Image (cartoon, rainbow, N blue to C red):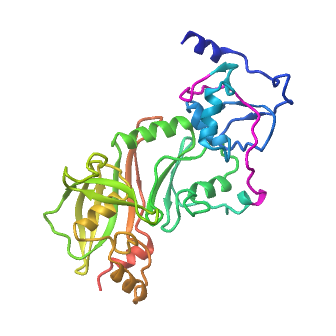
Amino acid sequence: MAAKKAARKTTAATTAASSAPKAAKNSAAGSVQTQTTASVQRLVIDEGSVDQRLDNFLIKVLKGAPKTLVYRIIRSGEVRVNKGRASADTRLALGDEVRVPPLRLAEKPADEAAAVPAREFPVLFEDDVMLVIDKPAGVAVHGGSGVSFGVIEQLRRARPQAKFLELVHRLDKETSGVLVLAKKRSALTHLQDQFRGRSTGKTYAALVWGDWPEKLKVIDVALHKYLDADGERRVRQVTTSHDPAAEQAKRSITLVKVAQRLGWASLLDVTIKTGRTHQIRVHLAEAGHAIVGDPKYGDFAKNRDLARGPKRFERMFLHARRLVFAHPVTGAEVVCEAALPADCEALTRPG
């Protein structure tokens, strides 16, 4: 422990090892882009990467590096923090110098980043440490799984001066509404702790097919996440201990309140006490009232008829309308609300 503390106090080196070419000393902010290079790199930790684990930091800055490579160079001692060996779970401090050995990585085409269009989204709240936006339906929160880019990539493109910008939580691509991003790592850690500790109040507006039963107000059924035959992520309920997935399933609690009855459908206020993947979508569908427009767990025939009919409604009606949490710096209660999108509002009008 003493040696570790001593390493933290070592003055950051300014030159590379004599056996390697001179290394560039880069700011290790969230916007660092590591170029393909055969020379040693020395990255200095700024406030954007404070308290991040060494392995996660390297995975982020070494674009295209396999995780197996990252962990190998850490274990072998080729990665150094303030000239000393460090483990994967070492927390980085402001001013730490991380030495990265010569690596040859597949470099992305120069026009790949340029292909991400800059975009701002409606702002619900913003200060020096966080940003809360109203995400539209049909936009992924990040790239991956066949999606080239999402909210986070577009915002970073629109805000090139931002040293740090990360998603605090996620919303499905088809879901609209309140989405929180952190502008400092300390805020990210604090906010994510709140989400994990279930100390946030998350309320969604969901329109479901049919007349929701008045007495059904609490759904407490475990959920299991898996991949289907096509490699698609899906979630199902686990209702018995004899189910093969019983040990892997996670308890999931959804609270439901009817906000409006339309006859053909019911508008619900849904509060989740646990944040499982597809939790609301699966719980409501398994209760016999799938979300209108849900392409994965919904009533496909009804969805098709609604999309082709006079209302022309072609999205999933699930909207993160309200989020309550403690400010990561002041501790004050922050309440963010996103009004129903115009197409959803129109669908709930009588007649």
Residue 334 location (% of width, % of height)? 41, 46
Residue 71 location (% of width, % of height)? 60, 34
State whether the magenta stretch is mostly helix, strand or loop: loop
Residue 320 placement: quadrant: bottom left
Residue 99 among magenta residues: yes
Q: Residue at x 35, y 39 (%)?
A: 197
Residue 338 location (% of width, % of height)? 42, 61
Residue 295 location (% of width, % of height)? 40, 72
Res 5 visible: yes
Judged left or right of residue 126, residue 202 is left
Location of the C terminus (image quadrant): bottom left
Tell me: residue 240, above or below residue 90. Answer: below
Q: Name the outermost residue toward the left.
A: 215
Residue 33 among magenta residues: no
Comparing 336 with 304, the one in front is 304
Tell me: residue 70, above or below residue 270. Answer: above
